[in-house]
Image: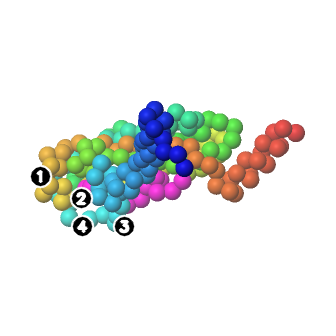
Amino acid sequence: MKRLQGPQRTVVQLVGVVLVMGALSWASVPFYDWFCRVTGFGGTPGRAAEGVDHVLDREITVRFDASVDSKMPWQFKPVQTKMTLRIGETGLAFFEAYNPTDHPIAGSASYNVAPYSAGGYFNKIQCFCFEEQVLAPGERVQMPVTFFVDPEIVDDRDAKYVHTITLSYTFYEIDLPEGYAALDAESNDTNLN
């Protein structure tokens, strides 16, 4: 086998670098998501089976933000834009989603909390984001999220001065689950006849 010399060797090295960079950038999104879920870093809230018994007198405001991916045809918004509650108190908020199309669409919500220092103290007990959502044509639903802010936030040197937390969701379109996909195919066949 002949060794590459000069420009040929440089081209092969550059192609190798581009391939490695592409692979790393592709893998960085799921790795970062995993890292944030494990560490609570990056504003990823925790999950809890239930609220806490200890409620503080100090209040905190939670703002709600909603968006959809550019390829997602749903309309999605918070029912209320903010809520003030005591630290440790369980809150219940609703988000509204609407499918204006003529076919069912499945969606999955990603979420984040800002500022990042509060992410590890914001806990969700129940959330529509834990499961994929399917909306029928023209369907409008209100989806709940039950949450609390852990009282330990007041002991964190970075997070204890946080007075407002923003909970953000973005919905992305995903493939329909198998049962829904069959119903969608049947409705398309009916519409064609």
Q: Which of 18 and 110 is in front in this view?
A: 18
- Looking at the rendered image, the disc whose residue lies closer to the viewer, 4 or 2, is 2
Is residue 175 visible in the rendered image? The answer is: yes
- Element carrying mark 1: loop
Q: In this view, does 125 lie above or below 58?
A: below
Q: Do the residues labelled 3 and 1 touch (CB within 8 Å)?
A: no
The residue that disc 2 covers is 150
- Element carrying mark 3: loop
Residue sitting farthest toward the front: 2
Kind of residue at badge 2? Asp
Q: Are marks 4 and 2 in contact (CB under 8 Å)?
A: no
Structural crowding at the residue carrying mark 2, measured as other residues with C-alpha within 10 Å and reported as few (<14), some (14–19) or many (≥20): many
Q: Do the residues labelled 1 and 2 touch (CB within 8 Å)?
A: no
Kind of residue at badge 1? Arg
Going from N to C along the chain, the mark reached first, 1 or 2, is 2
The residue that disc 1 covers is 157
Q: In this rendering, would 8 be left or right of 182? A: left
